[in-house]
Image (cartoon, rainbow, N blue to C red):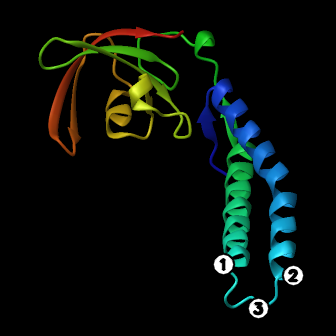
Amino acid sequence: MEKVPMLAEGYEKLTADLKAFRAERPKVVDAIEEARAHGDLSENAEYHAAKERQGHIEMSIADIEDKVSRAQIIDPTTLSGDKIVFGATVTLLDDDDKPVKYQIVGQTEADANKGRISYNSPLGRALIGKAKGDEVEVTVPAGDKFYLVKQVDYI
């Protein structure tokens, strides 16, 4: 079974989401029962919406339970070294020598707007294993991008 690397805060968010979905379960069951009481199910929009919501909740619960059971929590402050690995915070210089900063995180934690990219993203994959001073070329939908690794931190 393949482990799912994530930071502690990502794990906490997943478990909070799981708790919220589990709390919503009985409410959806009640909504289904109430809609069922209205009679003809073939034309009952409330019933169909509640059943659809129930399916979404059950699918989400199964997905999150799977990720939580395979979670490998990584604390970047315990890491060190010159090479970029999961959890590293990397400062890059782009083509215009403009600095950009990213932290390499798990898929569930990724948010490029907050400077967090997945280790599975094109840039994340290109950065893993690189060190300060290395040049990185990445092919993204907008074309090829070139970066210089300026700094690697474990914070």
Residue placed most toward the observer, 56 or 91: 56
Within the image, what quadrant is residue 70 found in? top right
Q: Where residue 33 sits: x, y (%)?
A: 87, 74
Relative image position of residue 36 (x, y in whole percent): 83, 81
- Residue type for callout 1: Ala
Mark 1 and mark 2: span between their CA atoms?
13 Å
- x then y, percent, for residue 154: 51, 11
Instruction: Answer above or below: position of 63 versus 136.
Output: below
Q: Which mark is residue 45?
A: 1
| Inter-mark Cα distance, 3 to 1 | 10 Å
Q: Is residue 125 left or right of residue 81?
A: left
Q: Which mark is residue 40?
A: 3
In the rendered structure, which disc, 1 or 2, sits on the residue that comes first in sequence? 2
How far apart, in angstroms, are the residues tagged by discs 3 and 2? 9 Å
Disc number for residue 125: none
Label ID, residue 37: 2
Q: Earlier in the sequence, mark 3 or mark 1?
A: 3
User: Relative to residue 8, is residue 102 drawn left or right?
Assistant: left
Q: Is residue 126 left or right of residue 35?
A: left
